Image (spheres, rainbow, N blue to C red):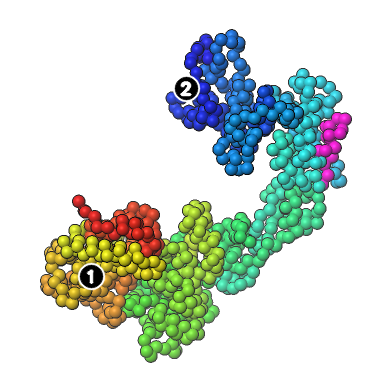
Amino acid sequence: MLDADGAEQVHPAVLVPVADAVRLLSRARRTADAHPAAAFWGAATVLALQLVARGRMLPGLSPGDHDAWRAGPLDAADVERVRALADAMPGEARAMPTGGGALLPEAAPLIRAFLDAVADTMPRTAAAPRGGLAGAFAATDPHRLPELRSWSDRIAADVDTGVRISLRLETHDIEHAPFRAIVQVHSLADPSAVIDADTLWTGTDPRFGERARLDVLLALRRAARVWPALEPLLNAGVPDRVVVGDDDLGALLGAATARLAAAGVEVHWPRDLVRDLTARAVVGAHDGPPGDLRAFLGGDTPLGFDWQLALGEQVLTAAEMHALAESHRPVVRLRDRWVLVDPALIAKARNRSIKPLTPIEALTAALTGGIEVAGKRIEVGTSAWLDELRERLADPDGGAEPIAAPKALAATLRDYQLRGLRWLDRMTSLGLGGCLADDMGLGKTVTLIALHLHRRAAALDGADPAGPAPTLVVCPASLLGNWQREIERFAPGTPVRRFHSTGRTLDDLVDGFVLTTYGTMRLDRARLADVAWGLVVADEAQHVKNHTSGTAKALRTIPAQARIALTGTPVENRLSELWAILDWTTPGLLGGLAAFRRRWVKPVEADRDGPTAERLGRLIAPFLLRRRKSDPGIAPELPAKTETDQPVSLTREQAGLYEAAVREAMAELRESTGMARRGHIIGLLTGLKQICNHPAQYLKEPEPRLDGRSGKLELLDELLDTILAEDGSVLVFTQYVTMARLLAKHLDGRGIGNQLLHGGTAPTRRDALVARFQDGAVPVFLLSLKAAGTGLNLTRADHVVHYDRWWNPAVEEQATDRAYRIGQTRPVQVHRFIAEGTIEDRIAAMLRDKRALADSVLTGGEAALTELSDTELANLVELRSSR
């Protein structure tokens, strides 16, 4: 081995099998302190592996007639890389056995030998026999096969040449046989040496060896196997050029060029030949902008979806497309230039129409830049007027429409509410629907009231020939009173009626608001469908996220000029819920549910496909306006919100009940399957949460003693003492009405003013309870989580207690937003009670860490836990020490 000064050094050597050396050297290449020789041969290893990966491997025989693989054939780029490696080989990388006294070998042969050695190891693995390979060229031990020597020599003669060839296409008789292919000869030893084949045959060039002609013939033989147009050259006296017919040219435009490149033959096209004819799918290229955009988007007039061909940046005319379609040759005359045309482009010119699109499909294509045809996505362009519509809709929170708050509105809209009004007006004026998905407490109700007043004023001014039209609001029964109060407060004088309970009527309805419940709407959908509604509004639209429910189906039967969904949680669990809402507001936007799941849900939810998610976002953005309290500039006047998980210890009684419940349930589960097993698990989870709340709830005691038996109740007492001493007010949420009643009894016994609201509370009683709390008559409001999670304005409270956990954080946030909303002037503190060492503790940790099981809990709630194995469930519910 030579040192840096060229002096010979002698070192002991260790022989390592090539397969082992490959693993070592590939790592050494990236090691900062690697020896120069190791780093160099690491780079050579990478080149060898890349050649193998590309299939550049040839079978043959070694000088001793043993089966051997070698790297090859090498193309010009491969040869150049070998040469570059040889030039960069450090002296330390050249080693040979001592005692020979010979000069050190040249670098290039050493590298070629190493590439061959690596190639020979790759097929010889333990897996080779399983792939149907055995014996010679696959077994670990070499086989001596002298009878294959002539075969091996023929392969070597075809590959081990000193030249390579390329084909230079030149224009010939363009009207009849447009091209001829000129054979060019390249020296592998000197890449700058390039001559035409006729020059090689008619003279000598010192840069090419004596067997250069034979090497050219061998290369032509290989090339003719993949492109038969070259076969005449094999028998020509001077194999220098061949005329290329239309069929052969078509093959060259197809797969033949790639096959020639694999055989080491490049194809060079004439520079003056135009090859930039392209095709793209275009929507509405031949359709002018509709006179009434609203009527168009709400109708089913089809738009053309066609192939459009362009020469460079210039779109072909209809006459040019027709001429191209009539052409049966791969070279055509377009705009005084000869243009090379792929046969696939001619096929598109002949069959220009892909399929007609509905207006909503066209809008979808414009927003996402593509559309699905026969299960495949096609990138599309759009006409100018569709581009303008897309740009108009692309920024749902922007726009320059000069819309002010209606004069009839008795409120001052905040900036973000005014932007919401502008967005709603833009969408509804186009006949499109939308989902206003602002956080609860940001004023969706007043924004919708402002929209109704704005549309009414515009109709009275003549903008809508049909005149003012009524607005139907469908909401939960608990929100009827809130809607009526808000309308009477912000739109005084606007007619409002409740279409609910007995004696409901739509007689003499002309304008204003009609308020109804989802249940009434389902029962009376035929009468509601007979009214010419200007707007239909679905408040708390998550109630119709199940599109197969009777409520959702009934809602779809009620026609309107536009549909608006209001919700703070457009996606509680999965994307199909968003589909259900948007398919109601803007039917057809997302396609059918099955297609939506295949095209969007699986790539986004299962495959985490970022580009697909980004396209889905572009499609949804114009139709879904989502603002959060935390967004900059949305609600800066809101005070701070502090959220705290407050762990509590179980009492001795609670711990005993908890362990007994787990022990008994696990014994039952070992003997149950199917639905019975799932039922046992649900019962176990419910029982454990009740034990964590209070033993009296779990034991269903008729006249319970409450003090001293529950860690949560003791913590609540401590909190209330502090809150009430500071003249505060508190909302206490629990998912169990039974627990709420126990808390009410306990607080009554302590002399603490409280009141209870649950799902069975009548709407009139509900309104009275809200007013009483807001007026400060009682400091503690006990609420059933599901019954009180929406539609209430309880800004009197500055503390929120979640006595037990609902395992979907979005539901808890909705409940918290009863206090933390517009109108709140004091900081809000949120207290979440968590029983230490219990299932509550584990679920809380998973929700914080967003681990895999947490995802299933978020999407499936308790039902997801019914699919756990016995071991997984035991780990989840086991009572652990909190120390």
Residue range in magenta is: 230-246
Residue 561 point in image, percent of width and height: 51, 76
Residue at image point 67% right, 64% down: 355
Q: Quadrant of residue 544?
A: bottom left
Q: How many marks?
A: 2
Residue 311 appearing in the image: yes
Residue 79 point in image, percent of width and height: 65, 28
Q: Is residue 336 magenta?
A: no
Depth check: 277 or 242 in front?
242
Mark 2, Cα crowd under 10 Å, few <14 / some 14-19 / many 20+, is few
Q: Is residue 79 left or right of residue 487?
A: right
Q: Is residue 115 left or right of residue 33?
A: right
**In terms of secondary structure, where does tag 1 sit?**
helix
What residue is shown with label 1? 698
519 w.r.t. 164: above or below: below
**Amino acid residing under circle 1:** Tyr
705 w.r.t. 156: above or below: below
The tag earlier along the polypeptide, 2 or 1, is 2
Residue at image point 44% right, 70% down: 545
Mark 1, Cα crowd under 10 Å, few <14 / some 14-19 / many 20+, is some
Residue 35, labelled with which disc? Answer: 2
Q: Is residue 61 left or right of residue 717?
A: right
Residue 597, labelled with which disc? Answer: none
Gap in angstroms between the C-alphas marked 2 and 1: 72 Å
Q: Quadrant of residue 214?
A: top right
